[in-house]
Image (spheres, rainbow, N blue to C red):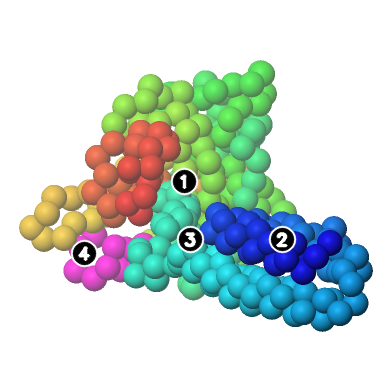
Amino acid sequence: MTLDEVRRRVEAARAEWAQASVEVRDLAALEALRVRFLGRKGVLTRLFDGLRALPPAERAEAGKLLNVLKAEITAALQARKGELAARALAEQAAAERYDFTLPGRWRPLGHLHPLTQVRREIEEVFLRLGFDVATGPEVETDYYNFEALAIPADHPARDDWDSFYIDDTRLLRTHTSPVQIRVMKSRKPPVRIICPGRCYRRDNPDATHSPVFHQVELLWVEQGLTMAHLKWVIGEFVRAFFGPGYEMRISADFFPFTEPSAQVHIRKRPGKWLEIMGAGMVDPAVLSEVGYDPEEVTGFAFGLGVERMAMLRYGVDDIRLFYQNDLRFLSQF
Ligand code: PHE
């Protein structure tokens, strides 16, 4: 080994470095290059090892040449590393950039079914007036659904409540009046309740009929109640639920369990009269049946359809819309 040879090898190594270093595109390739030149078995390390073969007088000179190259390569590695790291960071930042001016993603939020909303609203009106909510079974016995309400088996009024029978004595309740019987049988007067719930009738579905529907019935039994109290309670309800400006009309009707019986219409002038409920004074026979003394207490009741209230409130003209689960319809409420 001679000094000239070392010079040639250093030049060759410098040329090799120059060519290899321009091809580096990322940090991993740069690290591989560092190992290739400065690693334990790297190009420069081998050259340094070769110095031992030189005559001592030439070693210092050759060592200087190598050290210069090593310094060049080290500095170049350092500079390139900085460049590549900065570029990698810029690329990452570009890929992750957030545009805070973009509109947010819309996550639809569900809400209560319009019938549930209306039912709760009706309940709230009467809860404010001091009524309790009472519920009962949807599968009822013939006794509670009809018999105790003065509708015996052969009574023609049963035609008004076409029923789904389960067996000879049980049926799907056709109204929530049986809940009133159950409550009266289990409590002493005064009784002030509303009975919301699902009811069933064997009606063919059309714009105003559904075999499943919802009622809220009200019952107030106490000493000294008259039709005037009934009229007051209904008036309070109309004002609270429909708003001011409605007038109401009570006319005669027939229900086996009330005497007298009435139907209630409301209108906002000059609109037409709309029927909103059936009502009446509880028939003394019904009071006796549940063990109350009709000489001592009187009562009144009414029943309204939740669907009908919702249809009037929102101008819906087909009851079936409430059961089709079409979000285009439901999302409007
Ligand atoms: N239960 C009756 C019905 O479903 C409504 C009603 C209730 C009428 C209370 C009068 C009194 O038709």
Mark 1 packing: few (<14 Cα in 10 Å), some, or many (20+)? many
Residue 95's tag is 3
Write down the residue under mark 4: 246
Amino acid type at circle 2 is Arg
Badge nearest the viewer, 2 or 4: 2
Alpha carbon distance from label 4 to label 1: 22 Å
The number of numbered badges drawn on the structure is 4
Alpha carbon distance from label 3 to label 1: 59 Å
Amino acid type at circle 1 is Gln
Q: Earlier in the sequence, mark 2 or mark 1?
A: 2
Q: Over which residues does the magenta segment extend? A: 233-249
Asked whether disc 2 touches disc 3, contact meaning CB atoms under 8 Å apart, the reply is no
Alpha carbon distance from label 2 to label 1: 102 Å
Residue shown at the point (29%, 31%) measured from the top left: 207
Asked whether mark 1 and ligand 1 are closer than 8 Å, the reply comes as yes
Badge nearest the viewer, 2 or 1: 2
Amino acid type at circle 4 is Tyr
Q: Earlier in the sequence, mark 2 or mark 3?
A: 2
> Which of 298 and 60 lies nearest the eye of the viewer?
60
> Which of 132 and 222 lies nearest the eye of the viewer?
132
Residue shown at the point (41%, 51%) measured from the top left: 114
Give the quadrant of residue 241.
Answer: bottom left
Asked whether disc 4 touches disc 3, contact meaning CB atoms under 8 Å apart, the reply is no
Asked whether disc 3 touches disc 1, contact meaning CB atoms under 8 Å apart, the reply is no
Mark 2 packing: few (<14 Cα in 10 Å), some, or many (20+)? some
Please state if 78 lies on the left or on the right of 321 as rendered. right
Residue 9's tag is 2
Position of the C terminus, as image quadrant, is bottom left
